[in-house]
Amino acid sequence: MTTHYLVLSALLFSIGAIGVLIRRNAIVVFMCVELMLNAANLALVAFARMHGNLDGQIIAFFVMVVAAAEVVVGLAIIVTIFRTRRSASVDDVNLLKY
Amino acid sequence: MTSLLAAAPAAEIAQASGGVLGLSWLMIALPLAGAAILLVGGRRTNSFGHLLGTAMSLASFVVAVLAFFELLGRTAEQRRVGVELFDFIPAGQLDVKMGLLIDPLSISFALLITGVGSLIHIYSIGYMSHDPDRRRFFSYLNLFVAAMLLLVLADNYVGLYIGWEGVGLASYLLIGFWQFKPSAAVAAKKAFIVNRVGDFGLAIGIFTLFATFGTVAYGPIFEHADKASTGILTAVGLLLLLGACGKSAQLPLQSWLLDAMEGPTPVSALIHAATMVTAGVYLITRSNPIFDGAPTAQLAVAIVGAATLLAGAIIGCAKDDIKKALAGSTMSQIGYMMLAAGLGPAGYAIAIAHLITHGFFKAGMFLGAGSVMHAMNDDVNMRKYGGLRKVMPITFITFGLGYLAIIGFPGFAGYFTKDLIIEAAFGQEGVRGYLLGGAALLGAAITAFYMSRLMFMTFFGEKRWDKDAHPHESPPVMTWPLILLAIGSVGGGAFLVLGDRFIHFLEPVVGKPENHHGFNPVAPVGLITLVLVAAGVALAWVMYGRRPVPVEAPRGSFLTVFARRDLYGDAINESLLMRPGQWLTRFAVFFDNRGVDGLVNGLAAGVGGTSGRLRRLQTGFARSYALSMFFGAAIVAGALLLVGNL
Amino acid sequence: MPWLPILIAVPAVGALGVSLLPKGSDKLAKQLTLAVSLVVLALTIAMATQFSAGSKERFQFAQTYDWIPAFGVHFGVGVDGIALVLIALSVILVPIVVLASWHDTDASPDGHAEARPKRSTKTYFALILALEAMMIGVFAATDVFLFYVFFEAMLIPMYFMIGSYGGPQRSYAAVKFLLYSLFGGLLMLVAVIATYVFQAVPQGGEKSFLFTELIGRIQDPATQKWLFLGFFIAFAVKAPLVPFHTWLPDAAAQAPAGAAVLLVGVLDKVGTYGMLRFCLELFPDAAKFFTPLVLVLSVVGIVYGAIVAIGQTDMKRLIAYTSISHFGFIALGVFAMTSDGGAGATLYMVNHGFSTGALFLIVGMLIWRRGSQFISDYGGVQKIAPLLAGAFLIAGLSGLALPGLSSFVSEFLVLIGSYTVYPVYAIIATLGVILAAIYILWMYQRTMNGPTAESVKGMADLNIREKWVVAPLLVLIIGLGFYPKPLLDVINPAVKQTLSTVGVSDPAPKVPAAAEQKGAGQ
C-alpha cells in the first residue's frame, strides 16, 4: 500500500527536478524546489508509516520549517533581484563566477 | 729512539703553588685588559691609549721575566710547571680544562713575544704618531700579544687553537688597519682565509688526537704518544704540519705573507717576522713526542722547510719593495727553522734558538725599514732609495748589524744558529742529509746575495730620491728600540749557542739531541758556508754596489719575473682554487634559485595553472550547477545500487 | 609555583593587552611590550635559579593538567636542561628584538629605494608577544599533542609579521613560509595521531600523548620508521635542512630584521630541538636506521649552504644561507649521537641564536640607514660608522666560529663529537669552517672596507637605543665564548639522559690517556 505513496513521491520529485533544470524563471524554479522538498516529505511520512515509528514524521516537520524559512529568504532575494535587474530569469544572474 | 721518547716528557708537570708562576696568567690578562679598555673606551682613551697599550705590554714582559727567573731557580727536572685556570668546556667526553704550562720552551717564547713586542709598542708610539686611529692600533697590538701568549702558554691543544686563531684575528685586523685602501682589505682577508686552510688541518689534527687519546691536554697525550700507532701519529703530524704551513707561510700556503706587508710596518715586524709566523715552528716543537713517533711526518716537515727556505730566498732576490724583500727573507728563515724542527731531537733546540735570534734581527730590520719609509714619505721602492747611510746613521748602523746577523757573519747571531741548522741537516743519514744540507747551504748563499742587494740599494750608492723626499733620522722613541734589537742581533746567538746553554735549557721539553757536540767554529760545513756567503755578498756588490741601480726596474730574465711574481703562487691559487671556486659558487647559486627553488616554484605554478583551468567550471549559471548536482546525485545513487549496500 | 604556565600566560596576556590599546598609542604599545618582555625575562631568570642540573627528574617544574581526557591529551609542561636553555634564548632575544624594532613599523624615511607606508604598531608588538608565549610553550611542552599545537600556532604571528610588515616581496615570502611549514606540519600531525594510535600500552596503562609515557611505546620497526619520517620531515622543513630550505632566504630577506631574528634564531630551532627530543627518543631504532641519510643531508647542507652564501648579493639572504649551513652543523651534532655532539648541538642552537640574531639586527640597522639590502650599495662604512662596523665584525666573526666567541665552543664540540664516530663526515663539515671565513669576511670587506661609497656618506653611527640592542648580544657572544660552563653544566645531564634513552654510548678512545691521568692524579 505504501508503495503507491513512494511512487507518487518519486514522480513529484522527478517533476520538481526536471523543472529546476529546464525552467528559467526564478519563481518557477523556486516552486519546483518546493515540490522536491514536499516529495521528500511524502516519502518520509510514508516510510514512517511503513516502519511504524515517528522519526520520519518528525523529520518532515523539520523539513517544513526549513522550507518555510527558505521561502522567506529565497523570495526576498528574488524580489530584490527583480527590482534591480528587471528580470526574474536565473540565467541573467551569473555574476558570481570565476 | 725509544730512549729519547722517554727522555722528552720524563719531567712530570708540577702544579704551581703561589709565586710568580702561579700568577703567570697575568701575562695574558694584562694585554687583554689593555685591548678591552682601549676598544670599549673608544675615543675617550685616545689621549693615553698608546701609553696604556705599551705599559700593558711592558708589564707582561716584567711578569715573564720574573717567571723566567723563578723557573731558572728550579732544577731542570722541575721546570715544567702547570697552572690550572678554569674549567673551560665541560662536555661529555671532552673536558677541556684551561690551564697554562710554563716550561723552558713556552717561557722562551713568552720572553721573545713580550720583549720584542714591547720594543715594537714603543717604536709604534713614534711611527703611528700622526695616525688618527693610533689608539685602535695599540688595542689590536695588545690583543695580538695576549693571543700569542695564550698560544704558547696554553697547556692543551684547544687553548693553543684559540690563541692560534686569535693571532690570526689580530693579524687580520692589523694587516687591514688602513682598511680604506682596498689592497689592505683584500690582503687582510686573504691572510685570514689562507690561515683558515691551515687551521682546518690543525683542527682535524686535534680531533684525531682527541679520538685517539680521549683528551686534548699536552701532558697525557705526550706521555702516551708512543702507545698510539705510527699511522695515527703520522696523520696527526701531517695535519699539524698543514696548520703550521698556514700560520708560518710555508709552501704551499705561503702566498698571504707577501701581501700582508700592506699592514703598518711595526705589524710586519712583530707579527709577520718576529712572533706570529713562527707559531708553526712552536707547534711542531711542542708536539715533538708525536713527531718523534712519526718519521714520515718529520721528513715532510724538513722537506717543506727546505723548499720554503729556497723559495723565500729566491723571491727575496727580485723584490724592489723593501718590505716584500724582507718578507721573502722571513719565509726563508722560517723555512730554516722548520727544516731544523723536522730533523727531530737534533734540531728542535736549534730551531728555537734560530727563531729567537731571528726575532731580534728581523724585527730590527723591519723596524729599520719602517724608519726608512718614515723618512721617505712611506715609499717602499728601494730603487728610489740609495745613499741613505749618511742621513740616517742610527738606522743604518742598526740595520747593518741585523744584516750581518742574518747573513751569518762570524760572531753575529745568525752565524751561530744558522750554521748549526746547516750542520744538523748534513748530519742526517745518506742522501737525505746531502739534499737537505745542500738546500740549507744554497739558501745561505742566496740570503747573503739578496740581503746585500737590499743593503746596497738602500744605504749605499747615489741618491735616487723623489723630489719631495727629505730623509731625516727618526726620533729617539723609534731609534732606541732599533738599538736594543741590534744588541740582541749581535750577541743573541753567541749567548744562546756557546756552551750549549739553550740546548740544555730546552732539554726537559724536547729531549737530549743525539751525538751533539757543541759549536765548532772551524767545522768544514761552517767554512764552506762562509765561502758561499762571501760569494753571495760579492755577487751582490758586483750587480748593485759597483754599478748604478736603475730607478725603473728592468724587465729582467725569466727567473727574475718568476721570483717577482712570487713564483707564480698567486697565479696557481687563482687558476686552481679561486676561478673554479667562483664558478662553483655561481653554479650553486643558479642551482639553488632555478633547481631547488625552481622545483618548488614549478610545483606551485603547476597547482596554480591547474586550478586556473578548473575554476572555469564555475560559470555562474545556477542551472548548470543544478545539472551537475543532479548527475552527481545520480552517480552516487547508481554506485550505491551497484554495490548493493542499500 | 607553576613557573611555566605563568611564563606562557604573561606574554599571552601582554599580547592581548597591547592589541586592545586605543589607536594612536604607539609609544605606549612599545613601552608596554618591552616591559612585559622584560618581566618574562626576569621570571625566567628566577626560574632558572631554581633549576637543579643534577636532578634525577626527567622534567623539572613539571605541571600536567588534563586537556582532552578522551584522547589522553594533556596540558603538560616541564623543562630539562635542553629546553631550559632554549627558553632562555627566546626570552633574552625578545626584549632585544622589541628594542631593535622600535621604528620598524614607521614609514620609511625619504630617499629609500622602497617606500613603505606606516603600519599598525600595536599589532606588530602584540604579535611579538604572542609569538613569545608560543615559543616558550613549544619548548616547554611535555605532551606531544600540545607541542604540535604550539608548533603550528607559531606560524600565525610569524605569517603576519612577514606578510604585513616585510619588504617588497613580503606576501610571496609569507605564503611560501606558511605553505612549507604547513606541509611539514601536516605530515607531523599524521605522525602525531599515528603515534597515539600505534603505541603499545603496557598492562594497566592507558593511551597517552605524554612524552614520558610515549618513550619506548612504538616498538614495531616499520612503524617507527614511518613515524620518524613524519616527524623528521616536519623538523627538516622547520630547521631547515637542504633540500627543504628555499623558503628561509625569502622569508628572512623579506621579514623585518626583528622578525628575521625570531624566525631564524628561535623558530627554526624548534626543528633541531624536535629532532633531538622527539625523533631520537621516541623512535630510537629508526633514528639509528636513518642516521646515514641525515648525516649526508647535514654535511651537504653545511657545504652547500656556505657555497651559496658566498654567491649572494643580498645581505639578509646571505645570512639566511649561512644559517642553513649552521643548521647542518646542529643536525650533524644531534645525529652523531655522542655526548659531545649532542651538547655541542644544543649549545649551537643557543649560540647561533645570539650570533645570527646580532648579525641580522646589525644588518637591519645598516639597511634602515641606507634602504638597500644589496652589498654593492655599501662600502667603506667603517670610516663613517666605526661602532656599527665593529659590532658587525664581532657578530660576523662569531658566525665564522672564531675561538673566543661563543659559537666556536659549540662548533668545536659538534665537530669533535661527530669526528669520534663519523670522521669522514666531520672532515667534510670542517670545510665549512674555511667557507665561513670566505662569506663573512668578503661581505665585511665589501660593505665596511675600502673607499667610502658616495651613498653611505653621512651615515650615522649607532645611537643609544641601538647600542642597547647590540651590547647585550655582544656581551653574551664574548662571555659564553670564554666561559660556556654554566650552559654546558645544564645541558650535559639532559643530553646524557637523551642518549641513554636512545641506548648509545660514546666510543672509547684507542689510547685512553685521560682516564689514566685521572687515576694517577687522585
Image (cartoon, coloured by chain):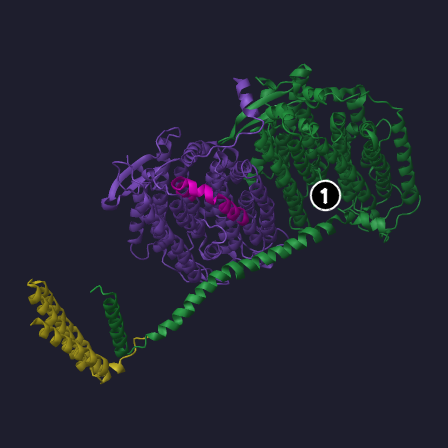
Q: Is residue C5 above or below residue C515?
A: below
Q: Residue at x 24, y 74 (%)?
A: B630
Which amino acid type corresponds to the residue marked 1 in the rendered image? Pro
Residue closer to the observer: C468 or C318: C318
Q: Give yes or no for residue C284 being in the magenta stretch.
A: yes
x then y, percent, for residue B72: 68, 17
Q: Where, quadrant-wise, is the N terminus of chain C in this rendering?
A: top left
Image position of C229 with respect to B4: above or below: below
Give coordinates of residue C264: x percent, y percent: 45, 49
Chain of the residue displaying label 1: B
Quick one: which chain is green? B
Q: Residue at x 80, y 50 (%)?
A: B468
The one of C154 and B546 positioned closer to us in this rendering: C154
**Total numbered circles:** 1
Please state the extent of the stretch shown in magenta in the rendering: C275-300
Chain A shown in which color?
Answer: yellow
Q: Main secondary structure of the magenta part?
A: helix
Crowding around mark 1 (Cα neighbors within 10 Å: few <14, some 14 to 19, many 20+) is some
Q: Residue furthest bottom?
A: A86
In this rendered view, identify the residue nearer to me: C287 or B160.
C287
The residue labelled by disc 1 is: B252
Q: Nearer the viewer, residue B539 or C213?
A: C213
Rendering coords of residue A6 (x, y %): 12, 73
Asked if residue B521 lies left or right of residue C143, the reply is: right
Occupied quadrant, residue B368: top right
User: Tag 1, which secondary structure?
Assistant: loop
Q: Is residue C441 visible?
A: yes
Among the chains pictured, the one given purple colouring is C
Q: Is residue C21 magenta?
A: no
Q: Is residue C32 visible?
A: no
